[in-house]
Amino acid sequence: MKRFTFIVVIFLCSLLISCQEEKKPRYFVPPEQIDGIGISRANMTNEILGQRTRQMIESQTFVILRHPESLEGAKRVVSSKKLQSAFRKAERVSSFPKKTLEAICFLESWGLAVQSPTGPKGPMQIAEGTAKQMGLKIERGTRYKIVSKRIAVKVRTKKGKKIRYITKRQRIPYQTIIRDDRMVPELAIPAAAQYLQRLEGKFGGRDLAIAAYHCGEGGTNELINLAKGSSGISGPITMSEIFFKCSPAYNRPLYLGVKKHLARDSSPTYWFRIKRAEELLTLYRQSPGAFRELWKNYQSPIKGRDRVPSRLWLWVKKDDLKYKIPQDLQDAGLVQLPNNPDYFGFLVRNDVGKKDPNNRKLYEQISKEAAGAIIYIAYETRRLVEASGGKFTPLEITSLVRTLAYQKILSRSNVNARIELPTHCSGMAFDISYKNISSHERECLKFILDDLEWAGALDATMESLRSMTFHIGVAPAYKDFFSKITLVQKNNL
């Protein structure tokens, strides 16, 4: 009887342990997730789609205002009597909104009648083939240029024949454009408006018409047809649905179509940029001073740089670069990342801080918010890889916090370290390698980083092909969100 009771107790204990193990998740799950990221796109409601669309529109502020010409461009588009007259006429003849035409002109040419290196011309940047569809005239004629050439001739002298050089002028014909309506705002802008109105009727939506204006009717038709065969998309197709209702694991053909056009000319993001340009021009019209102040926030802090290379350059201020020597990393409120690759989905590579072996442990730290971002990126990437049938390999963290002294050591052998803003010295930046993961996981990691960037949560830039790393930093607005993840993970170790 005692032996039977003992066996029963052992069985119940093992059953209890087994149940507890089943309750414990296979890997760390953050207490909160950002709506509509990664595989969560598969269950995106209209409300979440609206949130992602709003976030995407706002994210285009950086893309637009980091260009030094954007300030003068806004002034030209809003204040030029010639352009404003053309916009009003265009709206009358087409019923296409004046504010959208202004936004297109703003983004395409900053209000100038210029020629793109790729061919399009004028304030609306119209390609030659499209101009013919619009009814704009482009006429060519023959012109001549005078070319002087030195020619060697033989001349007879008393001492015999000698070579002498004479200058001969030749009249050489060439073809040139003698009339180009694309460069005339009064003609080009109304023609573009009527063309856009026709595209809106053809595609059934203004957002699709704007996309077609940028990437062509063929490219837009391709995306629409891919969207029609995708799950979760019903009723009128919009650019928001095309852009956000696909992923490497979900509606993959649509995802590949969007990816192809993003790589070609970023056209899937064009409508979002136009919407933000409309808002920015409204701001300029209401308060040029407020627009100027906003514009200043997006200009490079490094003298001589034309454009800011990444958002992280703007987020990290000079006062944030506070870690100058190794002693500054002691008791600085930084945290050590957990060492459990299977559970958390990442590992810190053992060569972090190798250039300063006496202080290597100090370089294995990071801020709480950056630690939370690493954990969250690994979580979303693992979910996406596994949902699309792949095998997940823990991500490799190749760099965490640095000091200015350590940055100088790196700069002796690394050209990139010499020219980059030392954002690692703020504790807000880190690097993730994609060298030792599969091409599929690399695709998923890049998708998650882009998705989080479009949501405004972080900035991620691809470093040189040689290093094969992503340089990542946390957005100020998401510091609290990522810090909470770090606090929760300590209870799961």
Image (cartoon, grey):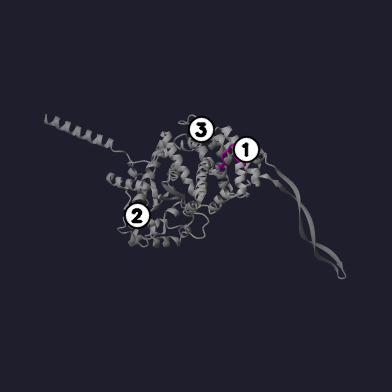
Q: Percent from the top left, x then y, of residue 209?
A: 56, 37
For badge 3, the amino acid type reads Ile
Tell me which residue sits at (29%, 47%) in the image.
490
What is the secondary structure assignment of the residue under circle 3? loop
Give the number of the mark in front: 2 or 3. Answer: 3
Disc number lying in front (3 or 1): 1
Q: Number of callouts in the render?
A: 3
Q: Quadrant of the N terminus?
A: top left
Q: Nearer the viewer, residue 323 or 186?
A: 186
Q: Which residue is mark 3?
A: 237
Give yes or no for residue 257 being in the magenta stretch.
no
Which disc, if any, is residue 93? 1
* Figure check: 275 above or below 413: above
Name the disc covering residue 364, or none.
Answer: 2
Highlighted magenta segment, given as a residue range: 89-98
* Residue 477 visible in image: yes
Does residue 24 sit above or below 311 in this rendering?
above
